[in-house]
């Protein structure tokens, strides 16, 4: 019988993850975080206490059996770990890289109460990457049924929904407007955080489930949602088109040449490979001094991409302080290491013209934090008389996005007043058989939340179609039994085996 | 939908050519005023091209292209019958708001002649009296004259040098039309921004509603990058999802023309590199 682990007997420090040297990596698009090897993963798996509470499972938006897969790692049964992961999350290599684990599973980890939390995300990534390297694919036995399901958008929400519906036996087609699938994973998240090969490997796995991808298809314009149901023979549709419509600052100089949205910069660089111009035809505006406005994850991507594109100086301009910055602390840290200059409590006032219609610099004003606003965050107020100018030749706005308008323009889907699609608890929309999830419902959020929404919508769609399947229920539902075994019994059973 | 085969190729001049592409679904869905975004190959850039015609029976859409830069020149060289495009998505944009105007002037300048055709035909099919004004630099560049004569009630052809039709600019043609008819309700103008600006100025005093179709640089075409933003009155609109048709009297053409310049340096370099590689008769570096 294994010795019971205690908080004092486990390795006290989190196993560090090797990263590329900051100064070197800021010149290329190689992935920054190197990932664990087996030895590192084993050591980290040792740190999990296998506590009875399992707060990590509830902390996960899709309810992965985290202690389960960690246990398999410690037994050196990596295939077993992969099996457990893919029961609930089909894309471990993606989630392991981009989830904000510090706000989810790791944020509530029992070990994290006294020491550094168990590095769940890093282990998930390790298993996912091993699976890609070894070519493992878990294709369950699928009983095909007569239902055809259409998925609009091949981003994380669409991919997750497609996977579940395919596993349930439906004939699934995913429609994507771009020429390559992946959605925001491809166009938005740079290679040094999420390599395109990883995304393509996961998409290929989906294809092995029978999921069909049709690119170059703009649903709403080529055909409408209503046509999908009424004419094209789809029994249910999931809409996961995202909320990519960028917000502009609406300050003087917004439309000067050299001002662009983070989405445009990232799409040119990531999807269109503009960083390899002229081998790839899409050009990029090259800036020697780049100012990115905003401090969310997109802004961090924009600053780090700008460095790699050869900027001498990259500034991050944010009107609130560092503690209020929405970006993952890890990404802010990486950006700092790479040489990005952060200007907190600074707000743009105008973009300055060089007289020829291009950017010459920016005028900003210093801010200080005043009373809290509706969101509970202290509102920044301008410090009078603190305007200053600085030189820049490229300005990138990463200050948020709005709903994509095409669905609203082309269908009778009921939207809320901000243009997002209205849904009920099951993510059903106002049109029978049409479900929606991800950013187009909630506004800009994370990859894992989109995946969670895709899975939740799949449950709703299966119920709508009357499909029963043996999918593992997840803990954020009211159904707490596992194949009929009550949770309490299940926990008791597992402790006994150990 | 993964194969966009070219079924017809026609060359109007040494710079203007027509491609008819098989896409039955798009042919069914396309409406006047809409455009596609095209990628020639995997390394290509995404460029917007207005749909010049669509044949719902044949299942094809037609693009009329001017070879001005690297991509359009490469397409001119490589897009022959039987070849395919790597990517083509559409129909994009809000279809032209066909009003119930009884008398309409459809103005096409240079390449703008192609995208104005479906609009002229649309208005005619809706029962309006359609006056087409087509402008070209000289008679060697004229195309689709018969197509317009067959479809419209009147045709005013203008060439800068007078080698065909009347000598004059588009705006001279508009003056002729305005002088002859005092009941023109709407003008639709498509062409280079400087021409559309001139058309809008020509009708401003007469207060005739003038719609234009703007042609900014685009990347995705689906409303997520903001690269195609134009100023329309007090607002900022995205041409790909809020347009591409806007009220010509509200569009800030100077801003549009300025923003169209933002890649001229690399465009020129790419063009020179392409021309050089053609001259050397070696395949381009990939």
Image (cartoon, grey):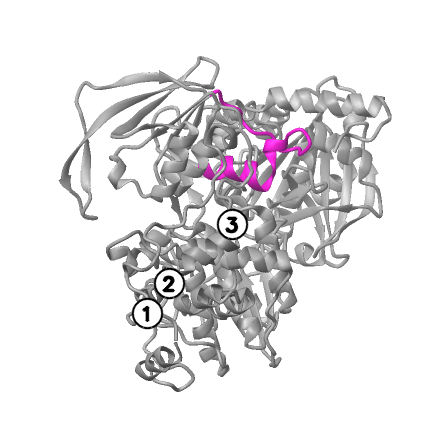
Query: Disc number at residue A4?
Result: 1
| Residue toward you, A197 or A56 | A56
Q: Is residue B91 above or below residue A22?
A: below
Give the image location of residue A227, x and y in percent.
57, 66
What element does badge 2 sit on? loop
Mark 3 = which residue?
A: A185
Of marks 2 and 1, which one's residue comes earlier in the chain?
Answer: 1
Q: CA distance from mark 2 to mark 1?
A: 29 Å
Give the image location of residue B210, x and y in percent.
51, 35
| Residue toward you, B23 or B140 | B23
Q: Is residue A62 above or below residue A273?
A: below
Q: CA distance from mark 2 to mark 3?
A: 18 Å
| Residue toward you, B240 or A380 | A380
Q: Among all residues in the image, which is located at the extreme top?
A: A355
Q: Name the residue rendered at 34%, 78% in the picture.
A: A491
Query: Disc number at residue A61?
Result: 2
Q: Which residues are magenta?
A: A262-288
């Amino acid at each position: 019988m294994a010795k019971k682990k205690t908080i004092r007997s486990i390795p006290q420090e989190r196993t560090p993850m090797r990263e590329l040297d900051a100064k070197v990596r800021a010149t290329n698009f190689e992935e920054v975080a190197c990932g664990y090897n087996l030895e590192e993963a084993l050591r980290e798996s040792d740190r999990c206490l296998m506590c009875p509470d399992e707060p990590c499972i509830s902390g996960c938006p899709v309810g992965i059996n985290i202690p389960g897969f960690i246990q398999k790692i410690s037994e050196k049964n990596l295939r077993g770990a992969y099996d457990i992961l893919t029961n609930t999350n089909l894309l471990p290599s993606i989630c392991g890289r981009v989830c904000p684990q510090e706000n989810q599973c790791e944020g509530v980890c029992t070990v994290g109460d006294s020491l550094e939390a168990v590095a769940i995300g890093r282990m998930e990534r390790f298993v996912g990457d091993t699976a890609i390297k070894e070519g493992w694919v878990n294709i369950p036995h699928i009983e095909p049924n007569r239902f055809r399901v259409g998925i609009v958008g091949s981003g994380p929400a669409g991919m997750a929904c497609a996977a579940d519906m395919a596993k349930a036996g439906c004939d699934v087609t995913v429609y994507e407007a771009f020429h390559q699938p992946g959605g925001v994973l491809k166009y938005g998240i740079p290679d040094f955080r999420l390599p395109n090969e990883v995304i393509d490997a996961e998409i290929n796995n989906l294809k092995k489930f029978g999921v069909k991808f049709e690119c170059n298809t703009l649903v709403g314009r080529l055909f409408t949602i209503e046509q999908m149901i009424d004419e094209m023979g789809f029994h249910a549709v999931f809409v996961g088109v995202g909320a990519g419509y960028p917000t502009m600052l609406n300050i003087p100089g917004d439309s000067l040449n050299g001002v662009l949205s983070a989405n445009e910069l990232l799409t040119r660089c990531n999807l269109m490979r503009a960083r390899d111009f002229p081998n790839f035809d899409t050009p990029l505006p090259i800036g020697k001094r780049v100012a990115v406005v905003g401090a969310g994850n997109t802004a961090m991507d924009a600053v780090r991409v700008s460095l790699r594109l050869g900027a001498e100086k990259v500034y991050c301009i944010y009107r609130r302080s560092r503690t209020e910055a929405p970006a993952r602390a890890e990404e802010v840290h990486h950006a700092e290491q790479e040489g990005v200059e952060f200007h907190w409590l600074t707000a743009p006032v105008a973009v300055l013209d060089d007289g020829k219609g291009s950017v010459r610099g920016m005028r900003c004003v210093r801010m200080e934090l005043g009373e809290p606003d509706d969101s509970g965050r202290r509102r920044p107020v301008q410090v009078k008389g603190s305007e200053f100018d600085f030189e820049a030749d490229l300005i990138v706005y990463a200050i948020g996005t709005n709903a994509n308008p095409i669905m609203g323009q082309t269908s009778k889907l009921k939207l809320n007043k901000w243009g997002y699609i209205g849904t009920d608890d099951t993510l059903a929309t106002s049109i029978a058989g049409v479900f929606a999830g991800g950013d187009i419902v909630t506004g800009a959020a994370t990859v894992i939340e989109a995946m969670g929404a895709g899975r939740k919508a799949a449950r709703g769609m299966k119920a709508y179609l009357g499909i029963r399947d043996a999918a593992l229920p997840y803990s954020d539902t009211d159904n707490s039994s596992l194949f009929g075994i009550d949770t309490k019994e299940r926990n008791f059973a597992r402790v006994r085996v150990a | 939908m993964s194969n966009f085969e070219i079924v017809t190729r026609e060359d109007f001049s040494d710079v203007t050519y027509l491609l008819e592409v098989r896409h039955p679904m798009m042919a069914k869905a396309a409406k006047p005023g809409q455009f596609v975004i095209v990628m020639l190959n995997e390394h290509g850039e995404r460029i917007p091209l207005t749909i010049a015609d669509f044949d719902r029976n044949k299942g094809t859409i037609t693009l009329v292209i001017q070879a001005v830069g690297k991509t359009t020149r490469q397409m001119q060289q490589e897009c022959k019958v039987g070849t395919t495009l790597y990517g083509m998505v559409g129909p994009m944009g809000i279809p032209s708001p066909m009003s119930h105007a009884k008398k309409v002037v459809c103005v096409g300048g240079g390449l703008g002649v192609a995208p104005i055709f479906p609009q002229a035909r649309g208005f005619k099919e809706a029962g309006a009296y359609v006056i087409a004004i087509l402008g070209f630099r000289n008679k060697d560049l004229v195309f689709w004259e018969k197509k317009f004569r067959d479809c419209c009630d009147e045709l005013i052809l203008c060439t800068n040098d007078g080698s065909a039709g009347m000598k004059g600019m588009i705006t001279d043609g508009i003056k002729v039309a305005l002088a002859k008819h005092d009941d023109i309700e709407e003008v639709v103008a498509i062409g280079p921004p400087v021409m559309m600006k001139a058309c809008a100025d020509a009708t401003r005093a007469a207060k005739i509603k003038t719609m234009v179709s703007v042609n900014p640089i685009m990347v995705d075409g689906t409303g997520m990058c903001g690269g195609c933003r134009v100023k329309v009155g007090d607002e900022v609109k995205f041409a790909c999802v809020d347009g591409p048709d806007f009220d010509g009297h509200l569009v800030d053409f100077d801003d549009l023309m300025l923003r169209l310049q933002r890649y001229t340096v690399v465009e020129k370099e790419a063009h020179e590199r392409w021309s050089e590689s053609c001259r050397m008769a070696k395949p381009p570096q990939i």
